[in-house]
Amino acid sequence: MKNILFIVVDSVTNDTLFNCSNSKQKAPFLNSLREKSITGDKMYSQAPYTEAALMSLLGSLDTLDYGGYMEKFKNKRTVIDEFNKNGYNTFFSTYYPSIYPSYMHYGAKELNYIETFHFSHLWSYRFEYYANLYLNKSTSPEENSMLEEMLGDNLKAWIELLKLLSEKGPKTELINECIDSSGIENTISQIQAELDKFNANKSEYLMQLFSDGEDHVLFKLPSYDYTDKINNDEFREYIIKNYYDTFQRIYSTQKKLCLKNTRFPWGKLIRNLNNPKCVKGLLAAYKNLVLDKDIFDRVNQNFDLFKAQRSFRTVADLSLDWIERNKNSDTPWMAYIHVDDAHYPENFFTYDTTDKEVVETEFEKINNYLSKLPKDYCGTISADLALLYCDSVIEYIFSSLEKNNLLDNTSVVITADHGFSYYFNPIREKYVISSYKENYNVPFLVYDKNIQHKEIAGFLATKDIPATLLDLAGLEVPSYFKGQSLLDFEGRDYSTLEYMGGGCPDLKRRPVILGVRDDNYEVITEILHDTIEIKEVYDMNKDPFEHHNLSKKKNLNITKQLDIIKNRYYEIMREADTVIE
Protein backbone atom coordinates (compact mmCIF):
# COMPACT_ATOMS: atom_id res chain seq x y z
CA MET A 1 0.00 0.00 0.00
CA LYS A 2 1.10 3.55 -0.71
CA ASN A 3 2.34 5.96 1.91
CA ILE A 4 0.36 9.19 2.00
CA LEU A 5 1.58 12.71 2.75
CA PHE A 6 -1.19 15.29 3.12
CA ILE A 7 -0.05 18.93 3.30
CA VAL A 8 -2.52 21.73 4.06
CA VAL A 9 -1.22 25.29 3.83
CA ASP A 10 -3.79 27.40 5.63
CA SER A 11 -5.33 30.35 3.75
CA VAL A 12 -4.20 30.21 0.12
CA THR A 13 -6.16 31.37 -2.91
CA ASN A 14 -5.75 29.41 -6.13
CA ASP A 15 -5.44 32.38 -8.49
CA THR A 16 -2.76 34.03 -6.33
CA LEU A 17 -0.68 30.86 -6.35
CA PHE A 18 -1.14 29.76 -9.94
CA ASN A 19 -2.77 32.39 -12.14
CA CYS A 20 -1.02 35.70 -11.44
CA SER A 21 1.48 37.13 -13.91
CA ASN A 22 4.29 36.39 -11.43
CA SER A 23 2.98 33.14 -9.92
CA LYS A 24 6.00 31.21 -11.17
CA GLN A 25 8.27 33.61 -9.31
CA LYS A 26 6.40 33.40 -6.00
CA ALA A 27 5.94 29.59 -6.11
CA PRO A 28 8.35 28.12 -8.67
CA PHE A 29 8.38 24.59 -7.27
CA LEU A 30 4.60 24.21 -6.92
CA ASN A 31 4.01 25.65 -10.37
CA SER A 32 6.48 23.13 -11.79
CA LEU A 33 4.93 20.30 -9.76
CA ARG A 34 1.52 21.31 -11.07
CA GLU A 35 2.57 20.23 -14.55
CA LYS A 36 3.05 16.68 -13.21
CA SER A 37 -0.06 16.51 -11.02
CA ILE A 38 -3.83 16.26 -11.09
CA THR A 39 -5.02 19.82 -10.59
CA GLY A 40 -7.65 22.38 -11.59
CA ASP A 41 -8.78 25.96 -11.04
CA LYS A 42 -12.27 25.35 -9.67
CA MET A 43 -11.90 23.68 -6.29
CA TYR A 44 -13.82 25.46 -3.53
CA SER A 45 -14.03 25.26 0.21
CA GLN A 46 -17.55 25.62 1.59
CA ALA A 47 -16.45 27.96 4.38
CA PRO A 48 -13.98 30.85 4.74
CA TYR A 49 -12.29 29.87 8.01
CA THR A 50 -10.59 26.78 9.37
CA GLU A 51 -13.01 25.48 11.98
CA ALA A 52 -15.84 25.16 9.47
CA ALA A 53 -13.69 24.34 6.44
CA LEU A 54 -12.10 21.26 8.04
CA MET A 55 -15.44 19.46 8.20
CA SER A 56 -15.30 18.94 4.43
CA LEU A 57 -11.55 18.69 4.10
CA LEU A 58 -11.11 15.95 6.72
CA GLY A 59 -14.58 14.43 6.91
CA SER A 60 -15.69 14.42 3.26
CA LEU A 61 -18.90 16.03 4.47
CA ASP A 62 -20.83 19.09 3.53
CA THR A 63 -19.98 21.56 6.26
CA LEU A 64 -23.38 21.60 7.98
CA ASP A 65 -24.10 17.87 7.75
CA TYR A 66 -25.30 16.13 10.93
CA GLY A 67 -25.59 19.30 13.01
CA GLY A 68 -22.61 21.12 11.54
CA TYR A 69 -19.39 21.91 13.36
CA MET A 70 -20.75 22.88 16.79
CA GLU A 71 -19.21 19.74 18.31
CA LYS A 72 -16.44 19.35 15.76
CA PHE A 73 -16.13 15.70 14.65
CA LYS A 74 -18.10 14.18 17.50
CA ASN A 75 -20.30 11.41 16.05
CA LYS A 76 -18.52 11.83 12.71
CA ARG A 77 -15.46 10.25 11.17
CA THR A 78 -12.39 11.64 9.46
CA VAL A 79 -10.12 10.44 6.69
CA ILE A 80 -7.36 10.01 9.30
CA ASP A 81 -9.58 7.55 11.16
CA GLU A 82 -10.19 5.65 7.93
CA PHE A 83 -6.44 5.19 7.49
CA ASN A 84 -6.25 3.96 11.09
CA LYS A 85 -8.98 1.39 10.42
CA ASN A 86 -6.97 0.13 7.47
CA GLY A 87 -3.82 -0.45 9.53
CA TYR A 88 -1.84 2.69 8.71
CA ASN A 89 0.48 4.49 11.09
CA THR A 90 -1.01 7.98 11.25
CA PHE A 91 0.66 11.21 12.35
CA PHE A 92 -0.58 14.76 12.87
CA SER A 93 2.29 17.20 13.42
CA THR A 94 0.48 20.43 14.32
CA TYR A 95 -2.15 19.67 16.97
CA TYR A 96 -3.43 22.10 19.56
CA PRO A 97 -6.40 21.49 21.86
CA SER A 98 -9.23 23.94 21.24
CA ILE A 99 -13.03 24.23 21.64
CA TYR A 100 -13.71 20.48 21.77
CA PRO A 101 -10.24 18.89 21.93
CA SER A 102 -11.25 15.21 21.78
CA TYR A 103 -13.02 15.74 18.49
CA MET A 104 -10.85 18.33 16.76
CA HIS A 105 -9.16 16.09 14.22
CA TYR A 106 -10.04 12.66 15.55
CA GLY A 107 -8.01 9.67 14.53
CA ALA A 108 -4.25 10.27 14.55
CA LYS A 109 -2.32 7.54 16.41
CA GLU A 110 0.61 9.89 16.96
CA LEU A 111 0.52 13.66 17.24
CA ASN A 112 2.66 16.59 18.22
CA TYR A 113 1.41 19.68 19.95
CA ILE A 114 2.28 23.00 18.31
CA GLU A 115 0.48 25.39 20.66
CA THR A 116 -0.58 25.50 24.29
CA PHE A 117 -4.11 25.51 25.66
CA HIS A 118 -6.19 28.70 25.73
CA PHE A 119 -9.46 28.62 27.63
CA SER A 120 -10.39 31.83 25.83
CA HIS A 121 -10.92 29.81 22.63
CA LEU A 122 -13.77 27.86 24.19
CA TRP A 123 -15.23 31.06 25.61
CA SER A 124 -14.96 33.11 22.40
CA TYR A 125 -16.25 30.47 20.00
CA ARG A 126 -18.93 28.81 22.16
CA PHE A 127 -19.50 29.76 25.79
CA GLU A 128 -19.78 33.54 25.45
CA TYR A 129 -22.67 32.99 23.04
CA TYR A 130 -24.45 30.60 25.40
CA ALA A 131 -23.82 32.53 28.64
CA ASN A 132 -26.98 34.66 28.73
CA LEU A 133 -29.08 31.88 27.21
CA TYR A 134 -28.01 29.55 30.02
CA LEU A 135 -28.47 32.14 32.75
CA ASN A 136 -31.97 32.90 31.42
CA LYS A 137 -32.77 29.17 31.29
CA SER A 138 -33.31 29.38 27.53
CA THR A 139 -31.09 26.43 26.65
CA SER A 140 -32.53 22.99 26.03
CA PRO A 141 -31.56 19.88 28.05
CA GLU A 142 -29.58 18.70 25.02
CA GLU A 143 -27.67 21.99 24.88
CA ASN A 144 -26.99 21.86 28.63
CA SER A 145 -25.58 18.36 28.24
CA MET A 146 -23.42 19.53 25.33
CA LEU A 147 -22.04 22.46 27.33
CA GLU A 148 -21.22 20.19 30.26
CA GLU A 149 -19.46 17.65 28.06
CA MET A 150 -17.54 20.38 26.25
CA LEU A 151 -16.31 22.03 29.44
CA GLY A 152 -15.29 18.71 30.98
CA ASP A 153 -13.43 17.78 27.81
CA ASN A 154 -11.54 21.09 27.79
CA LEU A 155 -10.49 20.85 31.43
CA LYS A 156 -9.22 17.29 30.93
CA ALA A 157 -7.34 18.26 27.76
CA TRP A 158 -5.81 21.24 29.57
CA ILE A 159 -4.52 19.03 32.37
CA GLU A 160 -3.24 16.43 29.91
CA LEU A 161 -1.24 19.00 27.96
CA LEU A 162 0.27 20.60 31.05
CA LYS A 163 1.34 17.17 32.33
CA LEU A 164 3.04 16.50 28.99
CA LEU A 165 4.79 19.87 29.20
CA SER A 166 5.93 19.16 32.74
CA GLU A 167 7.45 15.88 31.54
CA LYS A 168 9.03 17.54 28.46
CA GLY A 169 8.20 14.48 26.38
CA PRO A 170 8.25 13.96 22.60
CA LYS A 171 4.62 14.95 22.02
CA THR A 172 5.44 18.51 23.06
CA GLU A 173 8.96 18.77 21.65
CA LEU A 174 8.00 21.80 19.55
CA ILE A 175 7.04 23.66 22.73
CA ASN A 176 9.20 22.26 25.56
CA GLU A 177 12.20 24.58 25.33
CA CYS A 178 10.24 27.62 24.23
CA ILE A 179 8.12 28.31 27.31
CA ASP A 180 8.62 29.21 30.93
CA SER A 181 7.10 26.20 32.68
CA SER A 182 7.74 27.35 36.24
CA GLY A 183 4.73 26.76 38.46
CA ILE A 184 3.18 24.29 36.06
CA GLU A 185 2.56 21.63 38.72
CA ASN A 186 0.63 24.16 40.78
CA THR A 187 -1.42 25.12 37.74
CA ILE A 188 -2.26 21.47 37.11
CA SER A 189 -3.49 21.19 40.71
CA GLN A 190 -5.63 24.30 40.30
CA ILE A 191 -7.27 23.03 37.12
CA GLN A 192 -7.81 19.61 38.70
CA ALA A 193 -9.53 21.34 41.63
CA GLU A 194 -11.80 23.18 39.20
CA LEU A 195 -12.54 19.92 37.38
CA ASP A 196 -13.46 18.29 40.70
CA LYS A 197 -15.81 21.18 41.52
CA PHE A 198 -17.36 20.90 38.10
CA ASN A 199 -17.92 17.14 38.42
CA ALA A 200 -19.51 17.61 41.84
CA ASN A 201 -22.25 19.87 40.45
CA LYS A 202 -22.02 20.57 36.74
CA SER A 203 -25.03 22.84 36.37
CA GLU A 204 -24.02 24.95 39.37
CA TYR A 205 -20.46 25.27 38.04
CA LEU A 206 -21.68 26.36 34.61
CA MET A 207 -24.00 28.89 36.23
CA GLN A 208 -21.07 30.38 38.13
CA LEU A 209 -18.83 30.39 35.06
CA PHE A 210 -21.42 32.14 32.93
CA SER A 211 -22.18 34.62 35.72
CA ASP A 212 -18.51 35.48 36.27
CA GLY A 213 -17.61 35.57 32.59
CA GLU A 214 -13.99 36.57 32.04
CA ASP A 215 -13.59 37.25 35.77
CA HIS A 216 -13.83 33.52 36.46
CA VAL A 217 -10.75 31.80 37.88
CA LEU A 218 -10.23 29.76 34.68
CA PHE A 219 -9.30 32.96 32.86
CA LYS A 220 -6.68 33.83 35.46
CA LEU A 221 -4.61 30.67 35.13
CA PRO A 222 -1.38 30.87 33.09
CA SER A 223 -1.50 29.56 29.53
CA TYR A 224 2.27 28.96 29.16
CA ASP A 225 2.55 30.69 25.80
CA TYR A 226 5.79 30.76 23.86
CA THR A 227 8.36 33.09 25.42
CA ASP A 228 11.42 32.39 23.25
CA LYS A 229 11.67 30.11 20.20
CA ILE A 230 15.34 30.79 19.52
CA ASN A 231 17.04 30.87 22.93
CA ASN A 232 20.02 32.58 21.36
CA ASP A 233 20.29 36.37 21.70
CA GLU A 234 23.37 36.52 19.52
CA PHE A 235 21.50 34.93 16.61
CA ARG A 236 18.51 37.21 17.22
CA GLU A 237 20.79 40.25 16.85
CA TYR A 238 22.33 38.71 13.73
CA ILE A 239 18.89 38.53 12.06
CA ILE A 240 18.00 42.10 12.99
CA LYS A 241 21.38 43.53 11.92
CA ASN A 242 21.63 41.68 8.62
CA TYR A 243 18.05 41.76 7.38
CA TYR A 244 16.38 44.90 8.70
CA ASP A 245 17.15 46.60 5.38
CA THR A 246 15.24 43.86 3.56
CA PHE A 247 12.15 44.59 5.62
CA GLN A 248 12.56 48.28 4.88
CA ARG A 249 12.75 47.39 1.20
CA ILE A 250 9.55 45.34 1.42
CA TYR A 251 7.74 48.24 3.12
CA SER A 252 8.85 50.91 0.67
CA THR A 253 8.29 48.72 -2.41
CA GLN A 254 4.79 47.81 -1.24
CA LYS A 255 3.94 51.47 -0.70
CA LYS A 256 5.40 52.65 -4.00
CA LEU A 257 3.87 50.00 -6.27
CA CYS A 258 0.44 49.99 -4.65
CA LEU A 259 0.08 53.77 -4.74
CA LYS A 260 1.00 53.60 -8.40
CA ASN A 261 -0.95 50.52 -9.56
CA THR A 262 -3.87 49.73 -7.24
CA ARG A 263 -7.19 51.15 -8.33
CA PHE A 264 -9.29 52.29 -5.42
CA PRO A 265 -12.96 51.26 -5.91
CA TRP A 266 -14.37 54.78 -6.00
CA GLY A 267 -17.52 53.56 -7.72
CA LYS A 268 -18.32 51.13 -4.94
CA LEU A 269 -17.56 53.74 -2.29
CA ILE A 270 -19.88 56.27 -3.94
CA ARG A 271 -22.66 53.70 -4.32
CA ASN A 272 -22.38 52.97 -0.60
CA LEU A 273 -22.04 56.46 0.88
CA ASN A 274 -25.11 55.71 2.99
CA ASN A 275 -23.36 52.63 4.41
CA PRO A 276 -20.64 53.86 6.82
CA LYS A 277 -19.46 50.33 7.58
CA CYS A 278 -18.75 49.69 3.88
CA VAL A 279 -16.99 53.03 3.42
CA LYS A 280 -14.86 52.49 6.50
CA GLY A 281 -13.98 48.97 5.36
CA LEU A 282 -12.85 50.11 1.91
CA LEU A 283 -10.70 52.92 3.29
CA ALA A 284 -9.15 50.67 5.95
CA ALA A 285 -8.33 47.99 3.38
CA TYR A 286 -6.59 50.48 1.11
CA LYS A 287 -4.59 51.85 4.02
CA ASN A 288 -3.56 48.35 5.13
CA LEU A 289 -2.51 47.53 1.57
CA VAL A 290 -0.33 50.60 1.10
CA LEU A 291 1.13 50.63 4.62
CA ASP A 292 2.14 47.16 5.80
CA LYS A 293 1.79 48.27 9.40
CA ASP A 294 3.23 45.18 11.07
CA ILE A 295 6.09 44.42 8.68
CA PHE A 296 8.74 45.60 11.17
CA ASP A 297 7.28 43.43 13.95
CA ARG A 298 8.68 40.54 11.96
CA VAL A 299 12.23 41.78 12.58
CA ASN A 300 12.08 43.40 16.03
CA GLN A 301 13.49 41.96 19.26
CA ASN A 302 10.56 39.54 19.55
CA PHE A 303 10.26 38.55 15.90
CA ASP A 304 10.15 34.86 16.81
CA LEU A 305 6.88 35.48 18.70
CA PHE A 306 5.14 37.31 15.85
CA LYS A 307 3.30 34.09 15.11
CA ALA A 308 1.80 31.90 17.83
CA GLN A 309 3.10 28.61 16.40
CA ARG A 310 6.32 27.20 14.93
CA SER A 311 7.60 27.77 11.42
CA PHE A 312 6.79 25.49 8.48
CA ARG A 313 10.45 24.47 8.17
CA THR A 314 10.56 23.40 11.83
CA VAL A 315 7.31 21.47 11.43
CA ALA A 316 8.67 19.90 8.23
CA ASP A 317 11.81 18.69 10.01
CA LEU A 318 9.73 17.16 12.80
CA SER A 319 7.48 15.43 10.26
CA LEU A 320 10.40 14.16 8.20
CA ASP A 321 11.98 12.73 11.36
CA TRP A 322 8.75 10.81 12.01
CA ILE A 323 8.68 9.57 8.41
CA GLU A 324 12.34 8.52 8.69
CA ARG A 325 11.52 6.46 11.79
CA ASN A 326 8.65 4.74 9.99
CA LYS A 327 10.13 4.26 6.51
CA ASN A 328 11.41 0.72 7.09
CA SER A 329 8.28 -0.49 8.83
CA ASP A 330 6.07 -3.09 7.19
CA THR A 331 3.17 -0.78 8.06
CA PRO A 332 2.37 2.03 5.61
CA TRP A 333 2.05 5.55 6.97
CA MET A 334 -0.16 8.59 6.52
CA ALA A 335 1.18 11.98 7.69
CA TYR A 336 -0.98 15.10 7.94
CA ILE A 337 0.76 18.49 8.08
CA HIS A 338 -1.30 21.66 8.52
CA VAL A 339 0.61 24.96 8.76
CA ASP A 340 -0.46 28.58 8.85
CA ASP A 341 2.63 30.43 7.60
CA ALA A 342 0.59 31.90 4.74
CA HIS A 343 -2.24 32.87 7.07
CA TYR A 344 -2.69 36.42 8.28
CA PRO A 345 -0.31 37.59 9.66
CA GLU A 346 1.99 36.05 7.08
CA ASN A 347 5.48 34.76 7.83
CA PHE A 348 8.14 34.29 5.21
CA PHE A 349 11.32 32.98 6.80
CA THR A 350 12.31 30.38 9.40
CA TYR A 351 12.11 32.68 12.42
CA ASP A 352 12.69 29.92 15.01
CA THR A 353 16.03 28.51 13.85
CA THR A 354 19.66 29.31 14.56
CA ASP A 355 20.83 27.83 11.27
CA LYS A 356 22.45 30.74 9.41
CA GLU A 357 22.63 28.83 6.15
CA VAL A 358 18.87 28.21 6.12
CA VAL A 359 18.05 31.86 6.84
CA GLU A 360 20.62 33.22 4.37
CA THR A 361 19.17 31.07 1.60
CA GLU A 362 15.66 32.24 2.42
CA PHE A 363 16.57 35.93 2.38
CA GLU A 364 18.49 35.48 -0.84
CA LYS A 365 15.26 34.21 -2.40
CA ILE A 366 13.31 37.09 -0.86
CA ASN A 367 15.62 39.73 -2.30
CA ASN A 368 15.67 37.99 -5.66
CA TYR A 369 11.87 38.02 -5.72
CA LEU A 370 11.75 41.71 -4.83
CA SER A 371 14.18 42.49 -7.66
CA LYS A 372 11.91 40.81 -10.20
CA LEU A 373 8.58 42.34 -9.20
CA PRO A 374 6.78 43.59 -12.31
CA LYS A 375 6.32 47.35 -12.59
CA ASP A 376 2.54 46.92 -12.71
CA TYR A 377 2.44 44.75 -9.55
CA CYS A 378 -0.75 44.73 -7.49
CA GLY A 379 -1.19 42.73 -4.30
CA THR A 380 0.46 42.19 -0.92
CA ILE A 381 4.18 41.50 -1.04
CA SER A 382 4.37 39.91 2.41
CA ALA A 383 1.66 37.43 1.36
CA ASP A 384 3.63 36.60 -1.80
CA LEU A 385 6.77 36.07 0.26
CA ALA A 386 4.85 33.74 2.58
CA LEU A 387 3.91 31.67 -0.47
CA LEU A 388 7.52 31.76 -1.64
CA TYR A 389 8.58 30.48 1.78
CA CYS A 390 5.97 27.70 1.84
CA ASP A 391 6.95 26.75 -1.71
CA SER A 392 10.59 26.45 -0.63
CA VAL A 393 9.72 24.27 2.37
CA ILE A 394 7.55 21.96 0.26
CA GLU A 395 10.43 21.64 -2.21
CA TYR A 396 12.68 20.78 0.76
CA ILE A 397 10.21 18.07 1.84
CA PHE A 398 10.14 16.58 -1.67
CA SER A 399 13.95 16.63 -1.86
CA SER A 400 14.17 14.83 1.48
CA LEU A 401 11.67 12.18 0.39
CA GLU A 402 13.54 11.68 -2.89
CA LYS A 403 16.87 11.45 -1.08
CA ASN A 404 15.47 8.70 1.14
CA ASN A 405 13.94 6.82 -1.83
CA LEU A 406 10.43 7.40 -0.52
CA LEU A 407 8.77 9.22 -3.42
CA ASP A 408 8.45 6.01 -5.44
CA ASN A 409 5.95 4.69 -2.91
CA THR A 410 4.46 7.94 -1.56
CA SER A 411 1.53 9.92 -2.89
CA VAL A 412 1.36 13.60 -1.97
CA VAL A 413 -1.71 15.83 -1.85
CA ILE A 414 -1.26 19.58 -1.30
CA THR A 415 -4.13 22.00 -0.80
CA ALA A 416 -5.50 24.77 1.44
CA ASP A 417 -8.41 24.62 3.87
CA HIS A 418 -9.83 27.92 2.56
CA GLY A 419 -8.75 30.99 0.64
CA PHE A 420 -7.02 34.20 1.71
CA SER A 421 -8.84 37.45 2.49
CA TYR A 422 -6.03 39.94 2.88
CA TYR A 423 -4.35 40.10 -0.52
CA PHE A 424 -6.22 43.36 -1.18
CA ASN A 425 -6.50 42.81 -4.91
CA PRO A 426 -9.26 43.74 -5.41
CA ILE A 427 -9.98 46.07 -2.49
CA ARG A 428 -12.91 44.75 -0.44
CA GLU A 429 -15.06 46.27 2.28
CA LYS A 430 -15.06 43.10 4.41
CA TYR A 431 -12.81 40.12 4.94
CA VAL A 432 -13.07 36.48 6.07
CA ILE A 433 -16.83 36.54 6.72
CA SER A 434 -17.70 37.31 3.13
CA SER A 435 -18.72 35.47 -0.02
CA TYR A 436 -15.93 36.67 -2.31
CA LYS A 437 -14.21 34.09 -4.48
CA GLU A 438 -10.75 34.56 -2.99
CA ASN A 439 -12.03 33.30 0.37
CA TYR A 440 -13.11 29.93 -1.04
CA ASN A 441 -11.22 29.08 -4.25
CA VAL A 442 -8.30 26.89 -3.13
CA PRO A 443 -5.37 25.32 -4.99
CA PHE A 444 -4.80 21.59 -5.04
CA LEU A 445 -2.19 19.19 -6.38
CA VAL A 446 -2.42 15.41 -6.41
CA TYR A 447 1.06 14.03 -7.08
CA ASP A 448 2.28 10.50 -7.59
CA LYS A 449 5.08 9.35 -9.87
CA ASN A 450 2.65 6.95 -11.54
CA ILE A 451 -0.08 9.54 -12.18
CA GLN A 452 -0.28 11.53 -15.38
CA HIS A 453 -0.93 15.26 -15.38
CA LYS A 454 -4.60 16.19 -15.66
CA GLU A 455 -6.49 19.46 -15.28
CA ILE A 456 -10.07 18.99 -14.15
CA ALA A 457 -12.39 21.53 -15.74
CA GLY A 458 -15.48 21.09 -13.56
CA PHE A 459 -16.25 22.47 -10.13
CA LEU A 460 -14.68 20.56 -7.25
CA ALA A 461 -14.97 20.72 -3.47
CA THR A 462 -12.53 20.10 -0.66
CA LYS A 463 -14.79 17.21 0.38
CA ASP A 464 -13.29 15.41 -2.63
CA ILE A 465 -9.84 15.35 -1.00
CA PRO A 466 -10.49 12.56 1.59
CA ALA A 467 -11.84 10.18 -1.07
CA THR A 468 -8.79 10.96 -3.21
CA LEU A 469 -6.38 10.20 -0.36
CA LEU A 470 -7.98 6.80 0.22
CA ASP A 471 -8.07 6.03 -3.50
CA LEU A 472 -4.37 6.86 -3.84
CA ALA A 473 -3.68 4.29 -1.10
CA GLY A 474 -5.84 1.69 -2.84
CA LEU A 475 -8.33 1.72 0.04
CA GLU A 476 -12.11 1.53 -0.17
CA VAL A 477 -13.90 4.86 0.07
CA PRO A 478 -16.68 4.57 2.70
CA SER A 479 -20.25 5.08 1.53
CA TYR A 480 -20.83 8.03 3.84
CA PHE A 481 -18.05 10.07 2.20
CA LYS A 482 -19.80 12.64 0.01
CA GLY A 483 -16.73 13.53 -2.02
CA GLN A 484 -15.44 11.89 -5.18
CA SER A 485 -11.92 10.68 -5.91
CA LEU A 486 -10.14 13.14 -8.17
CA LEU A 487 -8.32 10.25 -9.84
CA ASP A 488 -11.33 9.63 -12.08
CA PHE A 489 -13.75 12.53 -11.48
CA GLU A 490 -14.32 15.39 -13.89
CA GLY A 491 -16.19 17.69 -11.55
CA ARG A 492 -19.63 19.20 -11.06
CA ASP A 493 -21.43 22.08 -12.75
CA TYR A 494 -21.57 24.19 -9.57
CA SER A 495 -20.05 24.60 -6.12
CA THR A 496 -21.77 25.35 -2.83
CA LEU A 497 -21.06 27.54 0.15
CA GLU A 498 -22.43 26.82 3.62
CA TYR A 499 -21.52 27.88 7.12
CA MET A 500 -22.86 29.83 10.09
CA GLY A 501 -21.05 33.14 9.74
CA GLY A 502 -18.69 34.27 12.49
CA GLY A 503 -19.04 33.14 16.10
CA CYS A 504 -20.93 30.21 17.55
CA PRO A 505 -22.44 27.89 14.89
CA ASP A 506 -25.90 27.54 16.45
CA LEU A 507 -28.25 26.06 13.83
CA LYS A 508 -31.32 26.65 15.98
CA ARG A 509 -31.12 30.40 16.54
CA ARG A 510 -28.76 31.88 13.96
CA PRO A 511 -29.16 32.28 10.20
CA VAL A 512 -27.56 29.71 7.92
CA ILE A 513 -25.43 31.14 5.12
CA LEU A 514 -25.93 29.14 1.93
CA GLY A 515 -24.71 29.90 -1.56
CA VAL A 516 -24.26 28.47 -5.03
CA ARG A 517 -21.62 29.40 -7.59
CA ASP A 518 -21.74 28.22 -11.20
CA ASP A 519 -20.48 29.58 -14.51
CA ASN A 520 -23.37 32.06 -14.71
CA TYR A 521 -24.18 33.34 -11.23
CA GLU A 522 -23.12 33.37 -7.65
CA VAL A 523 -26.11 33.54 -5.29
CA ILE A 524 -25.68 34.01 -1.53
CA THR A 525 -28.54 33.72 0.96
CA GLU A 526 -29.18 33.83 4.68
CA ILE A 527 -31.94 31.56 5.97
CA LEU A 528 -33.50 31.73 9.41
CA HIS A 529 -36.58 29.71 10.44
CA ASP A 530 -37.36 28.86 6.79
CA THR A 531 -37.27 32.51 5.68
CA ILE A 532 -34.83 33.03 2.81
CA GLU A 533 -33.17 36.40 2.29
CA ILE A 534 -31.14 36.86 -0.89
CA LYS A 535 -28.07 38.81 0.21
CA GLU A 536 -25.82 38.82 -2.85
CA VAL A 537 -26.04 37.97 -6.54
CA TYR A 538 -23.16 38.36 -8.99
CA ASP A 539 -23.10 37.80 -12.75
CA MET A 540 -20.03 35.61 -13.23
CA ASN A 541 -19.74 36.45 -16.93
CA LYS A 542 -20.03 40.21 -16.67
CA ASP A 543 -18.64 40.67 -13.16
CA PRO A 544 -16.16 37.88 -12.32
CA PHE A 545 -14.56 39.94 -9.52
CA GLU A 546 -17.92 40.42 -7.77
CA HIS A 547 -18.06 44.20 -7.68
CA HIS A 548 -21.77 44.71 -8.47
CA ASN A 549 -24.30 43.08 -6.18
CA LEU A 550 -27.52 42.42 -8.16
CA SER A 551 -29.58 41.10 -5.26
CA LYS A 552 -32.09 43.97 -5.53
CA LYS A 553 -32.50 43.57 -9.27
CA LYS A 554 -35.72 41.95 -10.45
CA ASN A 555 -36.25 39.22 -13.04
CA LEU A 556 -32.88 37.54 -12.55
CA ASN A 557 -32.66 34.01 -13.90
CA ILE A 558 -31.49 32.39 -10.66
CA THR A 559 -34.30 29.87 -10.10
CA LYS A 560 -31.93 26.92 -10.49
CA GLN A 561 -29.50 28.29 -7.88
CA LEU A 562 -32.29 29.08 -5.41
CA ASP A 563 -33.76 25.59 -5.79
CA ILE A 564 -30.38 24.06 -4.91
CA ILE A 565 -30.13 26.33 -1.87
CA LYS A 566 -33.66 25.56 -0.65
CA ASN A 567 -33.23 21.82 -1.02
CA ARG A 568 -29.93 21.93 0.83
CA TYR A 569 -31.40 24.02 3.65
CA TYR A 570 -34.19 21.55 4.33
CA GLU A 571 -31.71 18.68 4.19
CA ILE A 572 -29.55 20.41 6.80
CA MET A 573 -32.51 20.90 9.11
CA ARG A 574 -33.63 17.28 8.74
CA GLU A 575 -30.14 15.97 9.48
CA ALA A 576 -29.39 18.28 12.37
CA ASP A 577 -29.75 15.59 15.02
CA THR A 578 -28.51 12.65 12.94
CA VAL A 579 -25.18 10.90 13.52
CA ILE A 580 -23.18 8.46 11.40
CA GLU A 581 -23.55 4.91 12.65
Image: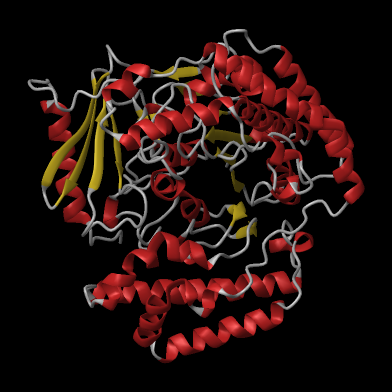
Check the image and report above or below for 33 versus 146.
above
Check the image and report above or below for 12 versus 453.
below
Which quarter of the image is occupied by the C terminus?
A: bottom left
Q: Give me the residue at 60% from left, 13% from top.
A: 22
Residue 244 is at least partly visible in this image:
yes
Q: From the viewer's perspective, is 454 left or right of 508?
A: right
Q: Which residue ends up furthest to the right in the rendered image? A: 234
In depth, the one of 558 and 254 nearer the eye is: 254
Which quarter of the image is occupied by the N terminus?
A: top right
Q: Give me the residue at 76% from left, 21% from top.
A: 367
Task: Report the coloring of the rendering.
Answer: secondary structure
Q: From the viewer's perspective, is 578 left or right of 424?
A: left
Image-quadrant location for residue 173: bottom right
- Give percent across and percent down for residue 45: 39, 36
In depth, the one of 19 and 546 nearer the eye is: 546
Q: Which residue ends up furthest to the bottom in the rendered image? A: 200
Check the image and report above or below for 280 versus 310.
above
In depth, the one of 364 and 520 nearer the eye is: 364
- Give percent across and percent down for residue 159: 59, 76
- Give percent across and percent down for residue 137: 23, 78
In depth, the one of 235 and 309 nearer the eye is: 235
- Give percent across and percent down for residue 264: 44, 18
Residue 27 is at least partly visible in this image:
no
Q: Give me the residue at 70% from left, 25% from top.
A: 250
Check the image and report above or below for 191 versus 491.
below
Image-quadrant location for residue 372: top right
